[in-house]
Image: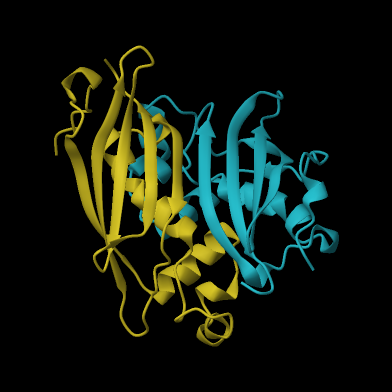
Chain colours: A yellow, B cyan
Amino acid sequence: MSAPVNPRLSELAVGDVVATRTLEVDRARLVRYAGASGDFNPIHWNERFAREVGLPGVIAHGMWTMGAAVGVVTEWAGNPGAVVDYQTRFARPVPVPDPGAATAEVTATVGALDPDAGTARIDLTVVVEGQRVLAKAQAVVRLEA
Amino acid sequence: MAVNTSYAGRVYPPGEVYQVSAEKIREFAESTANTHPAHTDPSAARALGYPDVVAPPTFAVVIAQRAEGVYIQDPDAGIDFSRVVHADERFTHHRPIVAGDTLTPTLFVDSVTERGPLAMVTTRVELSDDDGAPVASVVSTLAVRGQDA
């Protein structure tokens, strides 16, 4: 297997789609994330509790969706430490069925280029059941010129 | 009880020190489908110039949410966690977090504002290393629904 060639800032244009990925999330995945993150809010694993507080059922941690979506960016950049800034708003909850899984389609697009800073802003869209679940999801990535 | 707006501007003393381990980074990376080998393979991380495995971009939430607890769980702050929705989150990295880091969190309550039936609570956790150098900043906003919302 040859080493992947890392992207260079000078080769990018605003609007380029640089990566896509399909993510699946089921209840077991949420339990794993709860343990890994320390976020044990029962709305992310307890159906009864989630319904009692007015949700349709168990929903994914917003931070799971945010954390999983950026994986396409670090893979593309070839360096997880290249992401210097990453932000999002949580636009919609992601219900996670049981049995089964929710599917999220992630698309990473060049949103802006800053040659002076040596960074590209990568905008992420994350779509579940035809609706965007993250808003203004932007990762600023340091790249070679 | 309504959210207590007088907490805006509060700065807490430095929180519990957090030791970043390779196993915690692996667990977090695997649970979020962050598959770059530098999260789990020290030689892949060293090839990129890091001393040990590198944390995914949102790993700092582990340390930040723990630090936020002192405020969120304070009964006088008036935050009913069963009425909370996560509104937004931002990570700014001064350098990547790597296994072996010893990080100290400092919690700031940047703002507490009422917007109709919602209260918006913005916290910021600044992480610094052993030398006191800044490592990452984690800004989080929660929306708290009022009793009638």
- Measuring from the top left, give residue B87's x and y in whole percent: 53, 55
Taking the view exactly as shown, the residue that stands out farthest to the front is B116
Q: Compare residues B23 and B77 and report the one nearer the observer.
A: B77
Quadrant including the C terminus of chain B = bottom right
- Measuring from the top left, give residue A60's x and y in whole percent: 44, 67
Quadrant including the N terminus of chain B = bottom right
Taking the view exactly as shown, the residue that stands out farthest to the bottom is A48
- Measuring from the top left, give residue B44's x and y in whole percent: 35, 35
Which residue is at 54% across, 52% downward? B24
Residue A35 seen by the camera: yes
Give residue A91's quadrant in the image. Answer: bottom left
Q: Compare residues B32 and A46 and report the one nearer the observer.
A: A46
Apparent side of residue B143 relative to residue A61 in the rendered image (left or right): right
Give residue B139's quadrant in the image. Answer: top right
Give residue A96's quadrant in the image. Answer: bottom left
Taking the view exactly as shown, the residue that stands out farthest to the top is A116
Apparent side of residue A123 relative to residue B122 in the rendered image (left or right): left
Q: Is residue A117 above or below residue A52?
A: above
What is the count of numbered marks?
0
Q: Is residue B36 above or below residue B84?
A: above
Q: Compare residues A89 and A77 and report the one nearer the observer.
A: A89
Which residue is at 54% across, 65% downward? A34
Which residue is at 45% across, 50% downward? A89
- Measuring from the top left, give residue A82's x and y in whole percent: 39, 30
Residue B29 seen by the camera: no
